[in-house]
Image: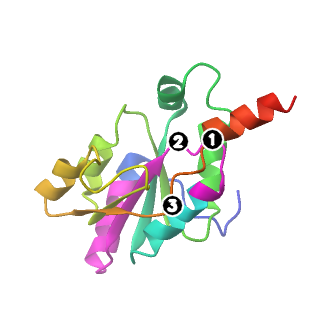
Amino acid sequence: MNSLAAPILSRADLISRVAAERTAGRTIILANGCFDLIHAGHIRYLNGAKELGGFLVVGLNSDRQVQHLKGSGRPFILEAERAEIIAALRCVDVVTVFDEPTVDNLIDDIRPDVHAKGTDYTVDTVPERERVLGYGGRVAIVGDPKDHSSTNLIKVISESN
């Protein structure tokens, strides 16, 4: 793997790293998703999260959870490679894979100062909103309008064959 890429950490190592970054005075930002087929919307979302200012942690849904969320035949790209791709983005500070059905446990473990979600949500509709607000964090909506999706990209590709 590229030594210039962000590290891909286990949960335990991530918790330690976040603690060190927080001790150093950095704001912890969490963004999460499947990132199965990377498109411009993903890049804009992650860049928007980083622009909030701080240490960007990207939580990546495991292969098992992507299949559960997206259906049979998904993911197209396995988690190790998806993690490597996300880690190679300049805006990303660290990547971790989570295998739970929701990002709740990851939030509980690292208690990000900011939980960044894409524009398919509003601050009021983010499922983890109450959890984040409950410990004093905040929710931010970042990225461009939700007019990109891996599902639509897959549809376009399959219809062109």
Amino acid beneath label 1: Ser
Residue 92 visible? no
Q: Which residue is disc 3 drawn over?
A: 45
Find the distance from the CA under tag 1 to the CA under tag 2. 10 Å
Quarter where residue 55 is shown: bottom left
Looking at the picture, tell me which residue is in the foreground, 48 or 135: 48
- At 39% from the left edge and 74% from the top edge, which residue is drawn? 52
Residue 155 lies in the magenta stretch: no
Residue 81 visible? yes
Q: Residue furthest right?
A: 161
Is 89 placed above or below 33 here? below
Residue 17 x, y percent position in the rendering: 37, 64
Find the distance from the CA under tag 2 to the CA under tag 3. 13 Å
* Quadrant occupied by the N terminus: bottom right
Q: Which residue is disc 1 drawn over?
A: 150
Residue 148 x, y percent position in the rendering: 60, 49
Label 2 secondary element: loop
Residue 25 lies in the magenta stretch: yes
Find the distance from the CA under tag 1 to the CA under tag 3. 14 Å
**Could you tell me how many numbered marks the image carries?**
3
Q: Which residue is disc 2 drawn over?
A: 34
Q: Are dots 1 and 2 in contact, CB under 8 Å?
A: yes
Q: What span is colored magenta in the figure?
A: 14-41
Taking the image as shown, residue 9 lies to the left or right of residue 149, namely left
